[in-house]
Image: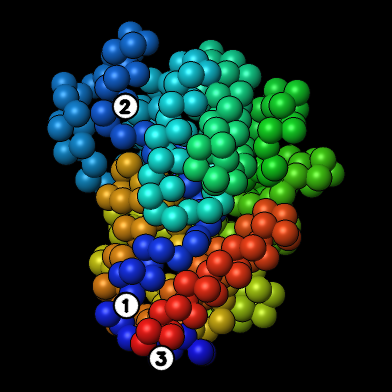
Amino acid sequence: MKYAAIPRDRLPALLAHMPKTELHIHIEGSLEPELIFALAEKNGVALSYPSVEALRAAYAFTDLQSFLDLYYAGASVLMNEDDFYRMAMAYFARAHADHIVHAELFFDPQTHTERGVPMGAVIEGLDRACADAKAHYGISASLILCFLRHLSEESAFETLQAALPYRQHFIGVGLDSGERGNPPEKFARVFAQCRALGLHIVAHAGEEGPPAYIESALDELQVQRIDHGVRCSDDPALVRRLAASGMPLTVCPLSNVKLCVFPTMQDHNLATLLHAGLCITLNSDDPAYFGGYLLTNFEAVFSALPSLGAQDAWQLARNSIDASFAGEPDKAAWRAALDQVFDQALAGA
Ligand code: ADE
Ligand code: ZN
């Protein structure tokens, strides 16, 4: 608890400057309305909204599905390799401004291949952006292919097959889209094949769905991280299991409030879970839709939850490094850089 002595008025600078990773960002959810309109015009795609302002004004969601309807419509402007590259480079510029040193980007190939966009255009555009993120910003970045859980197991198998020629460009697989009625076990056989291929495994669970979906992700899919997971609070035994196992939860605070998982940020349970010893990380989910990128998430949380202090800021950044799929030498360097930022603040406290 050595950083607990750092006063709260140092938090804004610490949150901004501490090195952090982002482990839960849907790259299609970083498409800002301005880029949606620019790509729609370039590609001759018709949009249901007359202007950037009208589109942004429609971002008032009642639940996950009300968001997903707009999110998939927004992603329909992405047609070729360069579109995917531009989208991801716009994210990396924001990530760099937020002192993100490493990002693991989710992408939803079925959203694009269903419209006739080749798998290669999706993955090669994103992969080129990951290489340039390193070259331009020093950000290490990798890709996680997500299966859409509202689609069939067969479609997931076909997607995996279509992605295998690009196997070296993605490090893992995830599970996203509408959670209710689509439990993790629906994809147990696909994930078994992915594990056999040596892919990292994550899944959205317990965002809107019940604690049983978190257990199913752990037991049937054998995930290495749970995306969201905040509804674990409904089952104290599960909370104890998550704490004891050190299973990371990639929590997305602004997303949870925007999608009415919690009525306000003051009601969010992340501080309770963190203080119960769970490996909580903060993430932006779909930053263009939910009111901010990663630093804005940190700022919103620390201003709404008075029980969080400098030690928690350090722990959240440290968790984000530990829970990443980066290599150990990189992780060791980021941990040292993180401690240096906090040691300096402590010396000046
Ligand atoms: N796809 C993009 N954002 C998502 C979220 N928050 N939950 C499930 N699927 C998603
Ligand atoms: Zn998500």
**Which numbered disc flags the more N-terminal residue, 3 or 1?**
3
Which SS class for mark 2? helix
Q: Residue at x 31, y 43 (%)?
A: 289
Q: Amino acid at mark 3?
A: Ala
Q: Is residue 137 above or below residue 205?
A: above
What is the x, y in percent for residue 315? 51, 75
Name the amino acid, label 1: Arg
Q: Amino acid at mark 2?
A: Leu
Using residue 138 as the reference point, say whether residue 285 is left or right of it. left
Where does label 3 land, which residue? 5
Mark toward the start of the polypeptide (2 vs 3): 3
**Residue 237, image x, y percentages:** 60, 80
Instruction: Give whichever of discs 2 and 1 has the lower sequence position.
Output: 1
Q: Give the Cα distance between marks 2 and 3.
A: 44 Å
Q: Which residue is mark 2?
A: 35
Looking at the image, can residue 36 be seen? yes
- Residue projecting furthest to the top: 44
Task: Read off the residue under disc 1.
Answer: 10
Specify few, some or many for label 1: CA neighbours under 10 Å numbering under 14, 14-19, or 20 or more: some
